[in-house]
Image: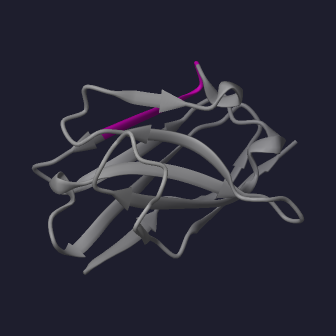
């Protein structure tokens, strides 16, 4: 069983930065590809970024390219989402999720989410 825990959310002004963290208790995160997703009020959950087990592959949705960076420190059992140049439209609950196969579409484990609010 993998229990994912997100942290690092908060309130920030437009143009500011936040770094989200995703860690796990139980089985080490090194066995999993990890993705970040977000869900804004009244909208469907959307993919933000993903990273494979050894950090050699990353994928981003177009709206965050050049602003967000996903990374991982397997020694610390943590995946990060560095968010720069934040915009009000980035406001959402951010979730991390884990899956075995980077190329697969199905994520097996999800965290509870952390709120990110960007004020204009």
Q: Is residue 8 above or below residue 80?
A: below
- Residue 105 at x, y percent in the picture: 49, 49
Q: Residue at x 38, y 46 (%)?
A: 80
Name the side, left or right, on which 53 lies relative to 36.
left
Q: Which residues are magenta?
A: 66-71
Residue 69 located within the stretch drawn in magenta: yes
The residue nearer to you, when weighing 113 against 60, is 60
Q: Is residue 24 above or below residue 96?
A: below
- Residue 94 at x, y percent in the picture: 60, 59
Q: Residue at x 21, y 59 (%)?
A: 29
The residue nearer to you, when weighing 69 against 16, is 69
Give the image quarter of residue 43: bottom right
> Which image quarter holds the N terminus?
bottom left
The residue nearer to you, when weighing 89 against 101, is 101
- Residue 2 at x, y percent in the picture: 28, 75
Secondary structure mostly seen in the magenta stretch: strand
Residue 58 located within the stretch drawn in magenta: no
Q: Residue at x 58, y 38 (%)?
A: 17
Give the image quarter of residue 72: top left
The residue nearer to you, when weighing 27 against 103, is 103
């Amino acid at each position: 069983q993998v229990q994912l825990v997100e942290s690092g959310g908060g309130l920030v002004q437009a143009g500011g930065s936040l770094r989200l963290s995703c860690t796990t208790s139980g089985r080490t995160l090194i066995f999993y590809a990890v993705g970040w997703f977000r869900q804004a009020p009244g909208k469907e959950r959307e993919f933000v970024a993903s990273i494979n087990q050894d950090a050699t592959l990353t994928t981003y949705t177009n709206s965050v390219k050049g602003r967000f960076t996903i990374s991982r420190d397997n020694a610390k059992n943590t995946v990060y989402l560095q968010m720069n140049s934040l915009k009000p439209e980035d406001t959402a609950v951010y979730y991390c999720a884990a899956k075995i196969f980077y190329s697969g579409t199905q994520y097996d484990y999800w965290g509870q989410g952390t709120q990110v609010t960007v004020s204009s």
